[in-house]
Amino acid sequence: MTDEAIELSPEFTKWVDRAEYAIAWSAPQNAVVVADVGGEIRFYIRGSREHGFRLSRAERSEPKRFVMESTDLTDIERYLAVDLADDVRQREGLAVLRVPGRVGEYADGISGCVDDGIVTIVVGHGSSIRFVKRDPYGPQPDVQFSHFATASVAEIIESALSPSGGPLFAYP
């Protein structure tokens, strides 16, 4: 897998800037890296349109850990746009987003299949998206993703900047 097809959208790139993260190519890691100012939180995007894209995350000196993979780079951008939203919201005086995330709380029409610690979901008629299975007592990234899986990055950003988090993230 190479970086040849990793072209992040302009909307996502602007969002990363607003979150005060940076985007860089790391030859030693063979990945696009999205990192906070001090580099303590780092996301690594690897892959190509031909082979799919993989997202991993590392904090401080910890090793990278798998987060998700998809054949569509937009899915990686969606996930990261929501992850970075709380940084933007905190800086702008807004409350954190509330996204359903308990086991089984999938958005309508989406379900997951667990196999060997990996959860696979299918959104619409698209290809499968894989996530790491987490502790069942904490938020599940696959469940959370299902609630914004069909939104554009622009719609995610618009909702993230809304005081209520609506329409995508306005839950009781």
Image (cartoon, rainbow, N blue to C red):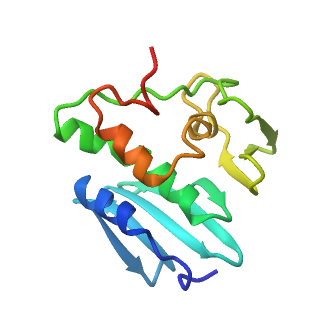
State the image coordinates of residue 68 (x, y, percent, origin top left).
Answer: 61, 53
Q: Quadrant of the C terminus?
A: top left
Residue nearest the observer in this picture, 43 or 15:
15
Q: Position of residue 13 (x, y in %)?
A: 34, 65
Query: Is residue 147 shown left or right of residue 29?
Result: right
Residue 157, relative to residue 26: is it above or below?
above
Return the residue nearer the eye: 83 or 126.
Answer: 126
- Taking the spot 45% from the left edge, 84% from the top edge, the residue there is 27
Q: Residue at x 22, y 36 (%)?
A: 90
Res 61 visible: yes
Q: From the viewer's perspective, is 58 left or right of 135?
A: left
Q: Is residue 64 visible?
A: no
* In the image, farthest residue toward the top: 172
In which quarter of the view is residue 62 placed? bottom left
- x and y, in percent, of residue 89 in the image: 25, 38
164 relative to 168, above or below: above
Instruction: Find residue 80 and report its horizontal and vertical position in percent.
Output: 45, 52
Q: Residue visible at 59% across and 46% down?
A: 150
Count the marks: 0
Looking at the image, residue 61 lies above or below residue 150? below
Q: Is residue 45 left or right of residue 50?
A: left
Location of the N terminus (image quadrant) = bottom right
